Image (cartoon, helix red, strand yellow):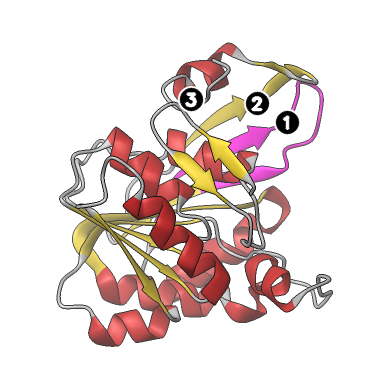
């Protein structure tokens, strides 16, 4: 059995197409919850890692997740049930549009580590293709659904390749969601940025920017990264 153990919860990932990785940990640890969201939705939850990190970080009463791949959905449910916050966590099996039709309330935070590769290459399995490539969750479709579920003062926060960030910003604008903050993620000093965390909302504000460097050198994490993940990562 493949299990990744954090300090307060375990992630079973035997069948999930995408295992625990830096992208999910960065988004779970560095996402902005200063508006104290009471309702959170994790789109494309995979193993449920981001939802679990937010359950640990926040006092949100409702933390929902949605996952289209059945194997990942089943592992996500198991990870939720085995966590200390099982009473606040729930995972739906289906696609984003189904949740838009069925949901009875809005979310103060919609968060996602989406399948973001925009080209037409395919991974070795169908589940990995679904998890990695945006043909299953196109940017415009994602934001159209998010806009229907977001509360008036809520935020949408995602992590995407730095090279493609403008595509996601343009798609958000079509759903009347405005870029509010951009955090540029560098793997190491002197290396090109690989990822960016984007925050959107209905309110148009002056866009702010920040940066994060993950490692000083291979296996040597920066103080900023360690400080933000020390309540989760077993090695910090």
Q: Mark 2 points at which residue?
A: 214
* Residue at x-position 56% and y-position 76%: 137
Q: Is residue 71 above or below residue 49?
A: below
Q: Mark 1 points at which residue?
A: 187
Give the CA separation, mark 2 to mark 1.
5 Å
* Residue at x-position 21% and y-position 47%: 37
- Mark 3 crowd level (few <14, some 14–19, many ≥20, 10 Å Cα): some
Residue 44 in view, yes or no: no
Q: Where is residue 30 in the image (x, y as percent from the top left)?
A: 45, 34
Reply yes or no: does residue 215 show up in magenta: no
Residue 161 in view, yes or no: yes
Q: In this view, does 81 lie above or below 232?
A: below
Q: Position of residue 107 (x, y in %)?
A: 23, 62
Please provide the residue range marked out in magenta: 179-197
Give the CA separation, mark 1 to mark 3.
16 Å
Q: Are marks 1 and 3 in contact (CB under 8 Å)?
A: no
């Amino acid at each position: 059995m493949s299990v990744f153990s954090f300090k307060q919860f375990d992630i079973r990932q035997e069948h999930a197409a995408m295992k625990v990785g830096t992208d999910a940990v960065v988004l779970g640890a560095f996402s902005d919850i200063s508006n104290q969201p009471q309702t959170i939705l994790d789109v494309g939850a995979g193993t449920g890692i981001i939802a679990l990190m937010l359950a640990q970080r926040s006092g949100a009463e409702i933390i929902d997740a949605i996952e289209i791949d059945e194997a990942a959905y089943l592992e996500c449910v198991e990870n939720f049930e085995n966590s200390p916050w099982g009473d606040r966590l729930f995972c739906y099996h289906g696609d984003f549009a189904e949740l838009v039709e069925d949901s009875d309330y809005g979310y103060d935070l919609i968060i996602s580590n989406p399948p973001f590769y925009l080209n037409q290459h395919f991974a070795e399995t169908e589940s990995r293709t679904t998890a990695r490539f945006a043909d299953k969750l196109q940017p415009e479709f994602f934001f159209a659904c998010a806009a229907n579920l977001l509360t008036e003062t809520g935020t949408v926060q995602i992590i995407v390749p730095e090279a493609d960030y403008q595509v996601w910003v343009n798609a958000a604008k079509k759903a009347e969601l405005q870029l509010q903050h951009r955090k540029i993620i560098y793997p190491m000093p002197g290396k090109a940025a690989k990822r960016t965390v984007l925050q959107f909302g209905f309110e148009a504000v002056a866009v702010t920017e920040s940066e994060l460097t993950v490692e000083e050198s291979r296996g040597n994490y920066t103080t900023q990264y360690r400080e933000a993940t020390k309540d989760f990562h077993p090695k910090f």
